[in-house]
Image: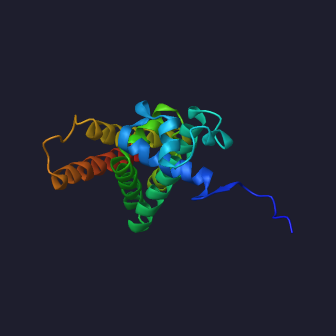
Amino acid sequence: MVPAEGPKRYHHGDLREALVAAGLSLLEEKGWRDFTLRECARRASVSHAAPAHHFASLDDLLTELSERGEVKLREAMETEGGRSGPEPAAQLVGRCVGYMAFAAGHPELFELMFHRGAAKSGQPALAPAVEALIPQASPEVKARMVDFAWSTVHGFIVLVLQGRIGGKDSSRRLKSRGLAMLAEMVETVLRAGNAS
């Protein structure tokens, strides 16, 4: 009996997933600028030519890693939003906390996602919470406040990751600063929504 055709399997299992796992590990260790397909193959215990079966180039693998990061970011935001309760303000803060937690937990992947222009989750994942917070606002104000919320949380966490904010703060103090910034952002969104 001839086995059914399917994805090629190697001694460690699915080559594509092995390369992605090795790639994510390598990315977090060395960053995307020092990332090589050859090193990724070595970590996956395959020949340097083996990745070509699934990824035609380094760029293709980095794109895959970036897209996987996008899914993880969206999941982190939805999870924290779900833990925050049903109130729109709490939902918005929770989703922002998820955004920052993902970025802090996966800084190299987060940087890769934005460097490649693949990161799209932040804005759409915040939109429902912003729109629920200011339901009476015009579509233009809602869109502007979604942009404002995203740029606020993104700017804060990028500056934290670069050591430009909170470099000498304890993790507790930094978290407190982040939550205070989010509270101010929510107040600004509410004011803008009520003024329209």
| Quarter of the image where one finds residue 28 | top left
Give percent across and percent down for residue 104.
33, 48
Q: Residue at x 60, y 36 (%)?
A: 60
How is this picture coloured?
rainbow
Tell which of 22 and 107 is nearer to you: 22
Tell which of 168 and 97 is nearer to you: 168
* Image side of residue 161 versus residue 88, left or right: left
Give percent across and percent down for residue 37.
52, 36
Q: Quadrant of the N terminus?
A: bottom right
Q: Quadrant of the C terminus?
A: top left
For the question of whether residue 144 can be seen, the reply is no
Number of marks in the rendered image = 0
For the question of whether residue 123 can be seen, the reply is yes
Q: Residue at x 22, y 34 (%)?
A: 164
Tell which of 33 and 66 is nearer to you: 33
Q: Residue at x 14, y 46 (%)?
A: 169
Q: Residue furthest right?
A: 1
Tell which of 90 and 34 is nearer to you: 34
Give percent across and percent down for residue 142.
49, 44
Give percent across and percent down for residue 111.
41, 37
| Quarter of the image where one finds residue 149 | top left
Q: Residue at x 50, y 52 (%)?
A: 21
